Image (tube, rainbow, N blue to C red):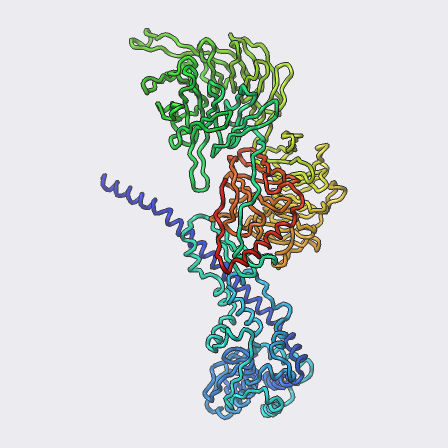
Amino acid sequence: MDSSTNSLDDVSADSSAEFPDRASLMEVRLQAQEDEITLLKSSLADALRRIRLHDQLLPLLKQQLIAVNPGAARVLNQVCCSDGCTSNRKLSSSSAFDGVRQSTTSYLSNSIVNNANGHIGSPVSVEPSPRPETLDTATQTELTMSGRDAAQDRATLAVTSRVQSLQLEDALLPGQPVETTRAKLHRIPGMEEEDEEQEEDEGEHEKELSWTSSVEEPIQPTTIRSLQREDFQDGSCSPEEPSPASASVRNSDQNLSARSVTLSTIQEGEKKELVRRNSEKLANPDKQRKRLDKKAASSANLLTRSPSLENRAKDLIPSTGSGSRRGTYGQGHSIKMFIRGRPITMYIPSNIQNYEDLKMEPPSERLELDWVYGYRGRDCRANLYFLPTGEAVYFIACVVVLYHINNRTQRHYRKHTDCVRCLTIHPDKVRIASGQTAGVDKDKPLLPCVHIWDSTTLVTLQQIGLGTFQRGVGSVAFSISDSGTFLCVIDDSNEHMLSVWDCNKGTKHAEVKTTNEAVFSVDFNPSDSANIITCGKSHVYFWTLSTGQFTKKQGIFGKYKKPKFIQCFVFSLTGDVLTGDSEGNILTWGKSAADVKTLGKGAKETFQIMRQTRAHEGSVFTLCNLQGGALLSGGGKDRKIIRWSADLAPERECEIPEKYGAVRTLADVDGEELLVGTTRNAILRGTFSDGFVAIVQGHVDEMWGLATHPSQNVFFTCGNDKQVFLWNAEEHKMDWCTTLEEYGLCADFSPVGSVVSVGLSTGRWLVLDLFTREVISESTDGNEQLSVMRYSPDGSFLAVGSHDNFIYIYSVTESGRRYTRFGRCNGHSSFITHLDWSKDGKYIMSNSGDYEILYWDIAGGCKLLRNRFESKDREWASYTCVLGFHVMGVWLEGSDGTDINALCRSHSERVVAVADDFCKVHLFQYPCPKLKAPSHRYEGHGSHVTNVCFTHSDSHLLSMGGKDTCILQWKVMGGGGGGGGGVGDSRERLASASASASASASSTSTSSPEPATT
């Protein structure tokens, strides 16, 4: 029984081990099938396009032939008339004689253009043997040849052999070169390639062959028949008039004798070939025939110019991720990249001469963190302290902020790789310990740990527990009685492991499991480092550490109601433990002698509640000791701060405004002045008598909308907390805030700068006055969320991108106060993600959720521009679209299309900032059209970066996190950033780089460097 069970377990384990490989293989096959479907669709579109172009070519070809030489038209008219006069008789499949008789003239006309190569004038060999079956396009019936019609067939072949030897030279005037005429015949409007997907993968040699094939396209039998129909309409030939074959032969002989110099007759064995462009490449007739046959079939042509499906599948096998990005270069035309198996074509601007040899370098500009907006109070405790230097210490995202409350300056500790979760101050008031949560940077895990660092120099002194803690670090505390020799840590594992570490050596001293319930706080007894207390959900534990081993005693609630949560605790001057709980009480705990009568011999002392004090309505979130033994408590539901005497008698109290939320933590400044951290991510400063004002504020939920003012150093944000903020980037403060009825997801300032538009989650959008904060206009477009708002450069239009796949255009008047629907852009097959206006305000470039790049003619009536090639040299007033030739290099290998949330080009057009899904901000040179372009990378956010935007002077960059609710303000250093006069330098820089690369390409082969990391 055991053996069978084990074998089943082995099979199950093997199956589970094989499952990732099978899933990866299925994903590879699925992507290969998607590529195959894409190619087949392109092939079908190409075939239909060529049919349409040939139909358009026929009347133009006839007109040009007649214009070149009317004599050639008479020959064609005679042949067409003889064919047309007999084609009105129906062919019966049972009447072989009628079929042969009709095929005489029909085959005569077809023979003018149908030969072994499919070109006019190419020599063919005519034999009296039965010819292969041909299909009569007039009757759709196969023609057969019987033996009794041999004589008539020989007569037909004689006529055919003469007419087949006609070449283009026969239709020319004496002395007129054939090259010029041939080019004229085929350079007809509409013959150019319209499908941008088909010419991108062929090299220079294939490109030349493609042009040659386009010039020398054969005249098909349908061409002659269309000329016949037009001749009948013109009255040049009537179906009732007799047109024997002998008449056609006589007319043909006369024409041939008149142009005997240029004719090459098959009977005499002459083989005069037509002079071709690039003839040196097509000198071999066999090779020529193969290449022309390859060009004749549209689908075959497409597949031969594109990578084979088999090779594509091989390319996909090494990367088993959900996304891929490969670049395919079509010299002189476009470059193609793939995202999740979908090809995206980027057309190369005209000023780039040699794309392959372009060198991408990191920008000379760099970023330096200037200011951090926000505070994490909504889900963290004991995260605000005051230092003797006059600085408040708190954290948000991956940054620990030291904010001088009087000088209004910030310093930042930035060595953490993921979100900081807890904080404590060493007894020396200089060293600080901060713990972070676990994270993932792409495929690389980020392990939780604790950093001990110097608050004066911001130098890391010790890194503790790397690889030991699970999920994250929840609470930390320094020992006090021994001057901070030890550090205790509670991690976020299921057992909430309690560990004690030597701060100087970084070694673990002891470890124990605490509980499976949540643990909120931990601390050493200030008079004995061997005693540690933890509290959390429905428990208070008293720990004793002896010779590396922990013993635990649980607090006994006895006759008192057991609260659901013990939120916080402190030690009184007498050594008692005071706890605040979810029932609004402050409990005083003390030791009691062993109850020998009840518990019997061997009973030990216990910790019990000595006193219960009613403090707040709702939870007691924080307790803070003051000098002299006084106590501060902060309430949750009632938002009160109460000062208590040493014997827990209430002395003073105050209530903070509702808009700031509940009291999360308290910090004593000087015994009178306090710092208050709130659950709505604000830090207040004040006293009981004067009240409290906010010195730090921020959003409390995920943020997406970001916009900078066109002429002032202010910016606007909105998010899922239904709040909108106007920030002052110079003074590093919030100017005003208001609350909306719905989520705000996008925003943009009008060029005049007096109003800002906000797109909401329900399809509504509002226009707010910056001075009065009032809504001056509102409208609704669809019932899905809006993703982008963008004013035209002159402010005359507003474009609204929606998740219903439409772009709504409004005309704007009265300085942005009046809006009228102008039109709607309909053509995207997925939701709109980004859009930009051209500098002249007439066109829009847009991206969508399925990685489309579309261009729109707004001035022309919101029309979709089918030929995207025409927009390759267009200049854009802004560049926020994540897909485009100029920003193609920002995408990393293996990207799945959602890895980049936003980007923004500087106003000087020198750099582009990128917000990615891995908590990073990148700074690239602009433009960066080469794959694997190098960049400067900056950390600080603890969640996906949702948006980036430069200020109007390019002096600063603003980046916004998602779930971390953090706004980082970066100062742009070096490179002349912030100067005006750089507009247009990007085109010149790219053109010069292309020229220099082209000059050095002959002697040196170069490759793009790997991205640089800072």
Relative height, residue 212 to residue 578 (above, below): below
Relative height, residue 867 to residue 508 (above, below): below
Instruction: Out of 661 and 893, give the one closest to the viewer.
Output: 893
Q: Quadrant of the N terminus?
A: top left
| Residue 955 pos. (x, y %) | 63, 38
Q: Residue at x 63, y 77 (%)?
A: 181
| Residue 851 pos. (x, y %) | 55, 51
Relative height, residue 657 to residue 748 (above, below): above
Q: Is residue 611 left or right of residue 659?
A: left
Q: Is residue 891 left or right of residue 487?
A: right
Q: Is residue 22 left or right of residue 290?
A: left
Q: Is residue 417 visible?
A: yes
Instruction: Out of 451 and 308, give the one closest to the viewer.
Output: 451
| Residue 47 pos. (x, y %) | 54, 67
| Residue 364 pos. (x, y %) | 56, 43
Q: Is residue 764 visible?
A: no
Could you tell me how many numbered marks the image carries?
0
